[in-house]
Image (cartoon, rainbow, N blue to C red):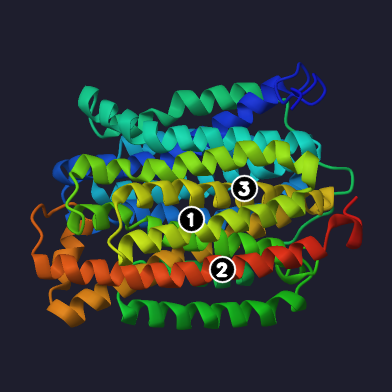
Amino acid sequence: MAAPTAQESIFGSETRGLTIAVMSCVGIIAYNNLAVAAALPEVGSDLGDVALLPWTISAELLTSGVAILAAGPLVDSLGPRRVFRWSVVAFILTSVACGVAPSMVGLVGARALQGVAAGLLFTVTMTVIGLSYDANRRARVFAANSIVWGVMSVAGPSVAAVMVAVIDWRGVFYFNVPVALIAAVLAWRLLPDQPETAGRQGFDARGIALVTMVSAAGLAVVEGSITAVVVGALISLAGLVGYVAHAPRVEDPVMRLEHVWGPRYRSIHSTSMLAVGSTLGFHAFIPVYLKAVEGTSTTAAAFSVVYLSVGWTAGAVSSSRAQQMFGRERVVLFGSLFLAPGFYGVAAAVIGDAPLWLLYTSLVIAGLGVGTISTTGVNILQERSPAAEMGRVSAAHQFVRTLMITYSVGIVGALILTTVDRRTGDVEAVRELLGGDADAVDPAIADALGAGFGFAMVAACIAATLCVPSALRLVRTRADEVTSAA
């Protein structure tokens, strides 16, 4: 296959600075998501109020999820450049605020504000990709971003460990500052300004409140019990029903329903949600499964997250080239045909007690599928989006994906914990494993945990199988068969 020409390269003279700025933004967002967990023991030891420790993660997840969606109308009306400047400065300031937090309450508050800045920054970054690159180069940018995310999945916790050792836990947050400054310097004048077609957008306070309700209920689901899943699902359903009734009544809803369920977009959303949600749902529990059931070392269990990342990155990179050859919609279908066998292999390794090499290989194959679907799907989405709505559409896609991931993690956790509870009555032993507080595992609990994870893999295989007809529907609504996005 021929190498990209200068006009196709994302590192050509016209786009080099912008590409590096985009990758820097992705890098700090990935680091912020992945590295903080490594510092939690030191944070709790220094600040006390350990009961609030989980909220240093949850508060940022909640506010960033809402901010991602709320940023869509802002970016479309004010332009990426202005919102980027606000968000990158806010991210630097809130990172410093996290680093100087005098108490756990102060840290949780600073993390909540940091989540707002990170959500705005993420939406700006995604929108800029859609506005600044043609479809073929956009695919390469998404592939480059996947490489950055894959590297940070390994390097992020390592950098955090170094910061903790050299400075203390506060250094984990200070590390954000120089990287964000690099992105700010590179992109300050390069990002697109306010589009000529932009109109004044209203502030949808009620819509944002309903979205916050849905997101908060989703976070409660991650607690893992059947009760939490049911109650969280009911609250989320009430919030969604309320939003569906609310959106048509206002001129500028924070998320337009047609951006989620319109014929141009819905197959993209559903395929991506099934692929990404089901994959990350069970993948979050792979380390605890390996440690408790397979008896691997803590290091080997922690390293297991790399296999999916390698496949995901390889899928993103290979699909960026394949899109030009076979068409973007067909490439998503190819990805779904990798995803399902990968899940079946993981299920066979878990349920059939197959060798671990099958599990690891299957994780790479599943990663190939989800990486292909995820990055190609976003490219299709942006190709079908009018420039004046790029921020809203990109934000809506990320929001529904995040919601699906949250519920998938909660459902898998509930299946595992409920199985252990019914077979042994000792759910706390699993919670200690998830928190990294237990080394030895009772054989009965290990057997029950393995059975629960097996049930979770059956559910994941069903979702992966449903991904194929969803991708087929996407192929049937190719770009030349929908209303022009120009």
Name the kind of residue labelled 1 in the image: Gly
The image shows residue 303 at horizontal and vertical percentages of 31, 40
| Residue 281 falls left or right of residue 391 | left
Measure the C-alpha gap from mark 1 to mark 2. Answer: 11 Å
Residue 385 at least partly seen: yes
Residue annotated with mark 1: 342
Q: Which mark is residue 465?
A: 2
Horizontal side, residue 159 vs residue 205: left or right: left
Q: Nearer the viewer, mark 3 or mark 1?
A: 1
Spatial separation of the CA atoms under disc 3 and disc 1: 13 Å
Which one is in front in this view, the residue at disc 3 or the one at disc 2? 2
Q: Tag 1, which secondary structure?
A: helix
Q: Position of residue 75 (x, y in %)?
A: 71, 47
Residue 465: horizontal and vertical position, in percent? 56, 68
Q: Is residue 166 left or right of residue 323?
A: left
Instruction: Indicate which disc, 3 or 2, sits on the residue closer to the N terminus.
Output: 3
Chain-order first, disc 3 or disc 1? 1
Q: N-terminal of the two: label 1 or label 2?
A: 1
Question: Which residue occupies 54% across, 65% down?
Answer: 464
